Amino acid sequence: MKPRRRISWQQFCETVEEAVQSLPAPFHKYLENVVVDVKEEPSERDYRAIEERGHEAGRGLLLGLFTGVPLTKQSYGDRYPNVVTIFRRPMEQVSRTRAALLRNIRATVIHEFAHHFGFSEEELESFEEAQRKLEAEERKKLRDD
């Protein structure tokens, strides 16, 4: 089933760009050798890349993908071109509202750039779980007030 479009292709790409620009200023100098790409959906090659890293590609929708050599694994003077890819259709499938879509785009951009900076999937899962718990506590506190 084709997902309902919540924003145009241009708006989607602009939202991805805004998410990249929203990264803290001290990180910007480390972004010059990163290409940000937007695709409609992942290819078989994208899924194979995930499987080659030891992750199960079939356990969920692929929202984004980092390919390249993390900065923490590059030597001084290395300039490996890294790529962050964001996938539109899966993003729309997991987002029930336009606001959720915008939040998910930003969260996925941050997640994939974290790989560029050397964070593993396991480290990010731990961080994201802690973030979800904090957000749930904040929502509960707002309801209780």
Image: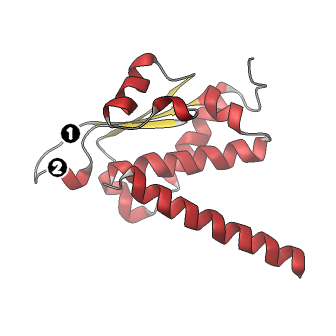
Residue 61 left/right relative to 80: right
What is the three-letter code of the residue carrying label 1?
A: Tyr
Point out the tag, 1 or 2, that comes first from the N-terminus.
Answer: 2
Neighbourhood count class around disc 2 (C-alpha, 10 Å): few under 14, some 14–19, many 20 upward = few
Secondary-structure class at tag 2: loop
Q: Looking at the picture, how far across and down is residue 6, in whole percent?
A: 77, 32
Cα distance in 3D space between marks 1 and 2: 8 Å
Foreground pick, 24 / 105: 105
Residue 93: x and y in percent read: 70, 31
Task: Please name the residue that numbered disc 1 is placed on.
Answer: 80
* SS under mark 1: loop
Q: Which mark is residue 74?
A: 2
Counting from the top left corner in percent of width and height, residue 79 is at: 18, 42
Residue in the foreground of this view, choosing between 47 and 107 = 47
Q: Residue at x 57, y 61 (%)?
A: 129
- As shown in the figure, which amino acid type bears the numbered disc 2? Gln
Spot the residue most to the bottom.
145
Residue shown at 63%/35% (left/top)? Answer: 91
